[in-house]
Image (cartoon, helix red, strand yellow):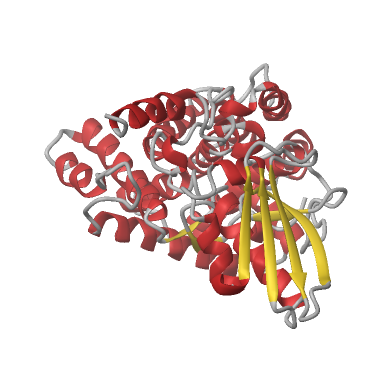
């Protein structure tokens, strides 16, 4: 596995796969072809199908300049390696191609080429499965976060501090911002109203309402193009911050303990990214919101004093009970059903934590087994239900939208 810095990416929404990664690819291509006078970019598959709603074209044109760049959309063409394919071509003054580069957005803002999954970082984690790492914890008496520190080095804490600061600011920004989110849905921000209303309830309902408010705040910031952290993706960026923010405020947990929980959460997210996928275009929303729920459940279990076995169990439940979750963004936007799913998954993460903490950590289905099944399930899902915006909720809304606008 590679560094957590590739999992926790600090950037601007609304989509890690459709916004962050294409922008990064365009930047890398421009650096190598700075003398090119014209560019042609072809977007394939899921990236093309929902790219306009996710502002993919804007992300690319911000780097390559619109007057000299042409973008071609091919939503029906899926390249073998991954559904999110991109081809960049540069041309010199004589019309010759300076470079022809096919690259893929493989989830969470990461780029990959066929036969080479990562373009930046080397493998630094010798153990890549939860089963191995849990056995290591049991043998050494150490925690998951200590394994992260051994592999990453102590400078990882400086980066995780920046991640935590960005997450907190995203919550605060989201609670302050009101109005309608960009796009044709006319979807109003709800975080502020949830936050205000939650205060009028008794403890249990108030706690749940605040958790919802924090998750909505970050997800709405992402949908509005605000600054967030992929955890593990933009579309699922509200789950982990809401759980951590809620626990830090309600239980007065120190930042130092939060950073350790972030390391543990990142480790479980990294396991999925390495052994399966966190790309909605490849495995559906189970790889985004499902993995985010697992990460948040693991973090919560650690903060509640869970053993390594209980933490693994909490993460396993967080992912297991999202198996088969489809990715069907309405109008290709990271709004419906994405925003509500973040709030719901945050609550599920807390429930998984509570359930695991009532046990001794022993259970039948391992986290690794669920990751394996998630990968198989994702590959079995028709492409209609994997971020193309052509099936499920997106299809029904599109039919209604077309009917209304043809009257």
In the image shown, does 300 or 389 lie closer to the viewer?
Answer: 389
Please state the horizontal and vertical placement of residue 341, each as a whole percent of the image: 42, 34
351 left or right, relative to 383: left
Residue 363 location, quadrant: top right
289 left or right, relative to 22: left
129 left or right, relative to 53: right
Give the residue at x 76% y 81%: 93
Give the residue at x 58% y 27%: 384
Please state the horizontal and vertical placement of residue 179, each as a whole percent of the image: 22, 53
The number of callouts visible is: 0
Residue 312 location, quadrant: top right
- Is residue 339 shown above or below 152? above
The C terminus lies in which quarter of the figure? top left
Residue 396 location, quadrant: top left
Give the residue at x 22% y 54%: 178
- Is residue 324 shown above or below 173? above
In the image shown, does 248 or 307 lie closer to the viewer?
Answer: 248
In the image shown, does 188 or 350 lie closer to the viewer?
Answer: 188
Please state the horizontal and vertical placement of residue 232, each as a whole percent of the image: 57, 47
Task: Pick out the residue farthest to the left.
Answer: 200
Task: Pick out the residue farthest to the top.
Answer: 364
Please state the horizontal and vertical placement of residue 231, each as a whole percent of the image: 54, 49
């Amino acid at each position: 596995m590679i560094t957590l810095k590739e999992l926790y990416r600090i950037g601007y929404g609304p989509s890690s796969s459709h916004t962050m990664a294409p922008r990064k690819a365009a930047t890398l291509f421009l650096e190598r072809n700075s003398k090119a006078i014209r560019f042609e970019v072809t977007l394939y598959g899921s990236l093309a199908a929902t790219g306009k709603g996710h502002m993919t074209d804007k992300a690319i044109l911000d780097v390559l300049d619109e007057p000299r760049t042409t973008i071609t959309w091919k939503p029906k063409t899926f390249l073998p390696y991954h559904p999110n394919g991109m081809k960049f071509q540069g041309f010199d003054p004589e019309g010759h191609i300076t470079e022809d580069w096919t690259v893929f957005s493989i989830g969470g803002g990461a780029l990959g080429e066929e036969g080479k999954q990562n373009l930046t970082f080397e493998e630094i984690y010798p153990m890549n499965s939860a089963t191995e790492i849990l056995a290591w914890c049991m043998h050494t008496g150490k925690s998951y976060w200590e394994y992260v520190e051994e592999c990453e080095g102590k400078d990882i804490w400086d980066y995780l501090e920046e991640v935590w600061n960005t997450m907190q600011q995203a919550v605060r920004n989201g609670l302050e911002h009101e109005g309608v989110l960009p796009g044709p849905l006319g979807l109003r921000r709800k975080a502020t109203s949830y936050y205000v209303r939650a205060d009028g309830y008794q403890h249990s309902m108030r706690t749940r309402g605040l958790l919802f408010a924090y998750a909505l705040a970050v997800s709405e910031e992402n949908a509005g193009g605000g600054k967030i952290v992929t955890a593990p993706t933009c579309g699922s960026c509200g789950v982990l911050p809401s759980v951590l923010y809620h626990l830090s405020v309600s239980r007065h947990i120190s930042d130092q303990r939060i950073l350790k929980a972030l390391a543990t959460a990142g480790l479980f997210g990294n396991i999925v990214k390495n052994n399966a996928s966190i790309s909605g275009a490849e495995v559906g929303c189970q790889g985004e919101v499902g993995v985010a729920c697992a990460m948040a459940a693991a973090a919560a279990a650690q903060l509640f004093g869970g053993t390594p076995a209980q933490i693994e169990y909490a993460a396993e439940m967080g992912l297991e009970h999202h198996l088969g979750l489809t990715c069907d963004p309405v109008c290709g936007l990271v709004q419906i059903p994405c925003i509500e799913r973040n709030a719901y998954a945050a609550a599920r993460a807390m429930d998984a934590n509570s359930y695991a903490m009532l046990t001794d950590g022993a259970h039948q289905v391992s986290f690794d087994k669920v990751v394996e099944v998630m990968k198989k399930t994702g590959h079995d899902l028709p492409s209609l239900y994997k971020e193309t915006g052509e099936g499920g909720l997106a299809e029904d809304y599109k039919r209604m939208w077309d009917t209304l606008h043809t009257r």
